[in-house]
Amino acid sequence: MKRILACGIGVLLLASINYSHAAQTAQATLFCLSLRFQQGVYHGAAGDITLNLSTTDLDTPNGELAPTFDSPDHYSGFILYDTLLDEVVTAGSLDLDTPPFADANDNGFDDFFESSQTGSGTSTGTYTTAVGNGTLRATWSRAAGSKDGTYALAFGTGQTALGTYAGTFELLEYAGPLDYTAGSNKVSGAVRLLQTGATDNVLAGPIEFTKVPTNRFDELYLTNSVWTNASGQSFNIGNEIDTFLRDLSLKTNYYGYVDFEDGDADTSELDYQTWVLSIDDVNDSDGDGIPDFSDDLGSGTVRPPTVALSIADTNLSFSISSTIGRTVEIQEVTSLGLTNWLTVNSFAPTNDPQVVLLPRPATAPRFWRLRVP
């Protein structure tokens, strides 16, 4: 008869086994759905003509190409100015798509608005002036890792063309830590976000979410708050309710709109108002797959798993008592002096206790332990 030494040990190989919703840190990225266009230039045979975009007064253009949430997806006003004759050529409005949606890093966000990703391609639109209208064709180029790119914007075709204007555009993106403390019905914290490519520019201030009672793990509401920049200028998050959702594919990401009353304090009018905030939280103190950011508060210390082992003719039966939904690994080794434990089964209990069957080993001795990764 073979002798099998079965050692069922409930071991938690984590730095801490306490489930606590003390202060935690997530990572936040904030990006504006408006683009900032710098002045474009068309080098004509009779001299240069400049292009400026503005969603406010064309006499003091703010460079904003703003979202429409429709098709085409962005709009602005524009003015063309003849630098040789020192006069306005024409002015009007334009509607323009950005390049087609792409998501090479599979995070759910359009690569065009992420500085870490390449933002290039072509798109089309239309323009309207007091004396006529026409088509637009845009060519965009931005390298991964840069907030700045180039554009070439062609107004019209053939005899009625107004020229092709080349210039640069800028993504407005901030990133940094979001320190938070989660409660039973809200999440309170603070952000300190640095602008990508211009880290002297900072947005910082309090942030608070309320959990939606009917879907508290996956849906939250952003509440009103005021942030400031390095110059002490205020950025008020409006009173309009913005819903944040947890990405059920990525699990650890939350996303939603942030609507500033004024997103650019250096201009005289309200502009650059619509932003998207992405929150990534890998903290999961109880290992249930729900980040601490929206998880329920725990009570006391997480219970280490326990096991009872019985042996049949062909199988080993492990009766494991552990936290439901929290991954448990059964590991095996041939000698307690060895450190290369082999994971022979990994599962998330759906019952307490849960019975797991393994084949009875053909050779002895064998030792087993439980590990919660």
Image (spheres, helix red, strand yellow):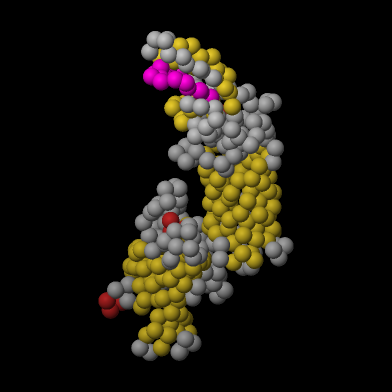
| Image label count | 0
Quadrant (top left, top right, bottom left, bottom right) of the C terminus: top right
Asked if residue 362 lies in the magenta stretch, the reply is yes
Q: Which residues are magenta?
A: 356-369
Relative depth, front residue between 82 and 244: 244
Horizontal relation, residue 202 to residue 112: left or right = right
Rendered view: 273 above or below 170: above
Residue in the picture at 68% in, 48% down: 190
Residue 344: where, in percent of width, then height?
44, 27
Horizontal relation, residue 359 to residue 216: left or right = left
Residue 139: where, in percent of width, then height?
36, 68
Q: Kindly tell me whether residue 212 is visible in this rendering.
A: no
Residue in the picture at 58% in, 56% down: 175
Q: Please identify the quarter of the rendering in which residue 19 is found.
A: top right
Relative depth, front residue between 316 and 367: 367
Residue in the picture at 48% in, 63% down: 145
